[in-house]
Amino acid sequence: MDHIELLTGLLLNLLAILIVILLLNFKYLSGKVHSFHLRPLSIYLISTILMLLSLALTVKLEDGFIYDLRFIPFLLGGIYGGNRILLWLSLTAVAIRAPLLGPGLILTMIMVILASIGIMYLRPRLANKPWKTRVYWFTLFAFVYSILSLWIPGMLFDFGDGGSFLVYSFVLTGSTFFVFYLCELIRTTYVLQLEAIKFEKMQVVSHLAASMSHEVRNPLTTVKGFLQLIHEDPANVNVNSELSKIAVSEIDRATEVINQYLNFARPHPETEIEVDILEEINRSKEIIMPLAVKKGIDIKTNTLHQHAIKGDPNKLQQILINVMKNGLEAMEKGGTLRVLSYLDGEKVLILINDTGIGMTNEQVLRLGEPYFSMKGKNGTGLGMMTVFQLVEGMRGTIKVQSKPNNGTSVILSFPVHKQEQTAPAMTPSKVRPSLR
């Protein structure tokens, strides 16, 4: 019966220690801290409170010895607090045991000295080890401590109640493992969480910088191409005048892209106006045409409605140019790029279809991921990531259908501008092309 009483008392002691540790961890982790580090004084006070709590829940049997789990908070404080805290905890452990007197006081003094020596030896040697290794070693240390707690009383006081000490050894060893495993797990998880937050912030900055570079490079490449055409035929005033106008508009678009990224730091209401689909498709076609001519690709556009959408025309142009440019780059041996806009209920759909190399289902699913690109080292994957973000920002959807060596179709869908919903529309089934 004594053994059952001892086991129950020790388990209640363990429960009290766990509750205090969990409450302190929750309170600490909920604060706005940037590192998992407690002050030495805080460690001393927490360890002392836990030792007093363990002493209050002590189990006293007929053999004259008292059993509790004071060793666990003593071990916690000594490991995480350092040698100075360990010294103060040693004095405190003896001081709080002294009022109870009895033969166990001498045993407490001996065990505190031995435990302090063991902690001072193990702590620096395990400091740089993996946290699971530390848990196993300190659990083994607790087991050795429990064995000494049985052997020393047997030598000094001719104590022979092996059953009680077996229960004590089992509970102390298991409790030490459980408590230290929990503490190290919480500590490691919190450190990893801080590193993940830092890494995520760095990723956001990296993606933002790379995406901005990618989006600004597109209009600058167009400007460079037009300037080269002007340089090759400076006498053709009429053509050069048109090329100059487009080049200036591309510079304006690059400026607008920069302003959009600056909006992350200075958010303001989005510009939403009526956007003419036909006008934006034709403008995007003009911008992308030099690259198409260079690759021997024919661009065909057709708009089967006169409806508009609500949003930012610069963003729509950015979307169209990115998708069309990807289509052109997928057709290394020439081909045809088709751009078709039609109605489907209350949605305006823009279909961009190429006859390029196509993609597998796995590659289609990865579209929009940062740094995933079909262009190898020449691509960043940020163009499609920007497309997905801009389409979502305009309350639209994007669908991609593709097969290897059989081209790709990108279908952009946007809500019809409300003021235009009463306009007549052609039946979608009559105008929708077959998708390959």
Image (cartoon, helix red, strand yellow):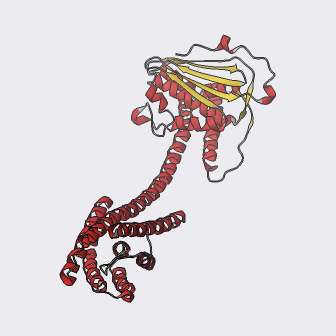
67 vs 330: above or below:
below
Q: Determine the residue positioned at 49% across, 68% down.
A: 24
* Position of residue 52 measured from the top left corner of the image (x, y, whole percent): 43, 79
Front residue of 333 and 211: 211
Q: Quadrant of the N terminus?
A: bottom left
- Residue 219 in view in this figure: no
252 vs 105: above or below:
above
Return the residue found at the far front: 1
Choose top left, top right, bottom left or bottom right for residue 251. top right
Return the residue found at the far top: 430
* Position of residue 229 measured from the top left corner of the image (x, y, whole percent): 55, 29
- Residue 184 as seen in the image, left or right of residue 153: right
* Position of residue 203 measured from the top left corner of the image (x, y, whole percent): 48, 49
Choose top left, top right, bottom left or bottom right for residue 429. top right
How many callouts does the rendering have? 0
Return the residue found at the far left: 155
306 vs 36: above or below:
above
- Residue 374 as seen in the image, left or right of residue 283: left
- Residue 293 as seen in the image, left or right of residue 276: left
Front residue of 272 and 90: 90
* Position of residue 408 measured from the top left corner of the image (x, y, whole percent): 51, 21
Q: Determine the residue positioned at 47% across, 24% down.
A: 330
- Residue 272 in view in this figure: yes
